[in-house]
Image (tube, rainbow, N blue to C red):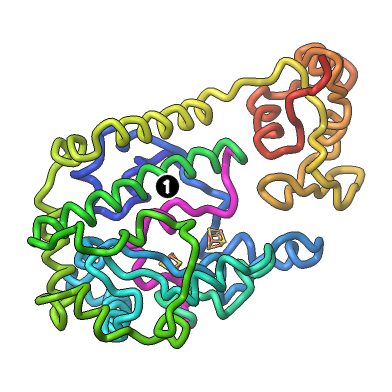
Amino acid sequence: MSPQSLWQEFPELYRHLLPDWFREPYQPEALATCADCAMCRPDETRYQVKHYQPDLKCCTFYPDLPNYLVGALLCDTRPELEAGRRRILGAIQTGVGVSPFGISAPKVRELLYAHGDSGAFGNSTALLCPYFDGEHHNCTIWAFRNAVCTTFFCKFNDGRAGHHFWAQIKAYLSYVQVLLSEVAIRALGMDLNALPENPLANNDRPVRLSAADLDGRVDAAAYQRLWAEHQGAEADFYRACYRHVQGLNRDHVAQLAGFQGERLLAAVQSAKADIDHPKLPQRLQRHPAGRLHEEGPEQIVAEGFNGLTVMPTLLWRFVTQCDGRRPTEAVVAAFEAEHGVEIDRDLIANLVQNQFLRESECD
Ligand code: SF4
Ligand code: SF4
C-alpha cells in the first residue's frame, strides 16, 4: 500500500480544524483488512487465538458521538448516508443517551461492556453497535465516526509501536471532541455549568444506574431540564452545533486547545517518530509472549502482538538464538555468517514490535 495522508483516516470536518501536521504521510494499516475482516478468518479459530464473528467484527462497542458529528451527518444529504441518518434519528427519538453533548451509550450498555470478559469483544451480539449494518457487515456512519472508532485497528504494520501511535491519536482526538462539543453548546447559548458532566469526557466513569437507566427509558423531568427550550428540536440543535464548528478554523481550535492540545499533539508526533525511526535494543532476547503454534521445515506459525504470523523457519531460528547476553549486532553477524543470509534491521525491529523479541533483561 502506498503512503497516504493521516487526514484520510479522519472525518473530513477535521481537515480544516486540526494542525497541518496531520498532512503527514503514513503507511495505512494494511493488516487490518476490514472488508475481509482479519479477525474473522478460519485460521484464527483453527489455532484458538482471539477471533471475532464476521457479523460483529470489532463493532461490539457503543460509541459516544459528539453533537457536531451527529449534526454533520444529519446535514449531509448524500443518499448513501440515508441508513446512518435513519439510525441516528431513531436514536434521537428514543431520547436515551441523547444530550446537548451528543448521543452516548445507554448506561446499561456501558455496564455490559465494562463487565464483558476478553472473549466478549467481537463475539457478543449484546454489545453490537446500533450503527452497524448487519446485512452488509459495515458501518452506516463511517464518515462521521468518533475518536475511538477512527483510531481502532486490530493489527498494526508496526505492532506495538503502531498501537501506541494510534492510542496517542485517540487521546488527542478525544480531547478535541470534548472541546468542540462544549464550544458548540456555549455558542448556542446554553449554560455549560448548568449541564451534567460531558459524557464524552470520561470513558472510565463509574456507572451508577437510575431506575430509568435500568429500564432503558428516559426520565421525562430530567430530560426536560437537560434540553430546556431545545427539547423536541434536538436534531436541529445538533445541526447548529455542526455549523458552528464548521465555521471555526485551525487557529481557533489551536487557541482553544491550548497547552493541553500542544502536549497531546507532541505525544502523537513522538509516537510517529518511533514508527518512522525504530531503534534496535543493544541486546535482544526472545519475548515470552510470542507463542509458537506450528513448526514446519519451511515456515512456522507463531502468535505475537498482531495475532498469528507466518514466517520463514530460518527467521524463527534467529529469534531463538537471541539469548539476551551477546550484543544484537554480534548475534546478527554470527547468524548471517552461519546461514549465508542477510537480515534486514527493519525486519528485526518488526520482530521486536510484534513481541517475538524484546530488550534483554540481562546486565
Ligand atoms: S479493524 Fe475491525 S473490521 Fe477491520 S480487520 Fe480489524 S477487526 Fe476486522
Ligand atoms: S460507529 Fe461504526 S465503526 Fe464505530 S462501532 Fe459503530 S459500526 Fe463500528
Image point (36%, 69%), residue name: 104
Position of 11 with respect to 109 (left or right) is: left
Can residue 137 be seen by looking at this rendering? no
Quadrant observed for ligand 1 in the rendered image: bottom right
Q: Nearer the viewer, residue 277 or 116?
A: 116
Q: Quadrant of residue 223?
A: bottom left
Image point (56%, 73%), residue name: 112
Position of 64 with respect to 61 (left or right) is: left
Quick check: 62 above or below 157?
A: below
Q: What residue would you read off at disc 1?
A: 170
Quick check: 15 above or below 246?
A: above
Asked if the beta carbon under badge 1 is closer than 8 A to the nearest atom of ligand 2, the reply is no
Extent of the magenta region: 135-158
Where does the image place residue 103, in percent across and percent down from the top left?
31, 70
Q: Quadrant of residue 305?
A: top right
Q: Is residue 155 magenta?
A: yes
Where does the image place residue 288, in percent across and percent down from the top left?
82, 39
Position of 168 with respect to 308 (left or right) is: left
Where does the image place residue 312, in percent across and percent down from the top left?
80, 39
Can residue 140 be seen by looking at this rendering? yes
Position of 130 with respect to 250 (left or right) is: right
**What amino acid type should be assigned to the residue bearing mark 1?**
Lys
Image point (85%, 34%), residue name: 314
Q: Nearer the viewer, residue 106 or 3?
A: 106
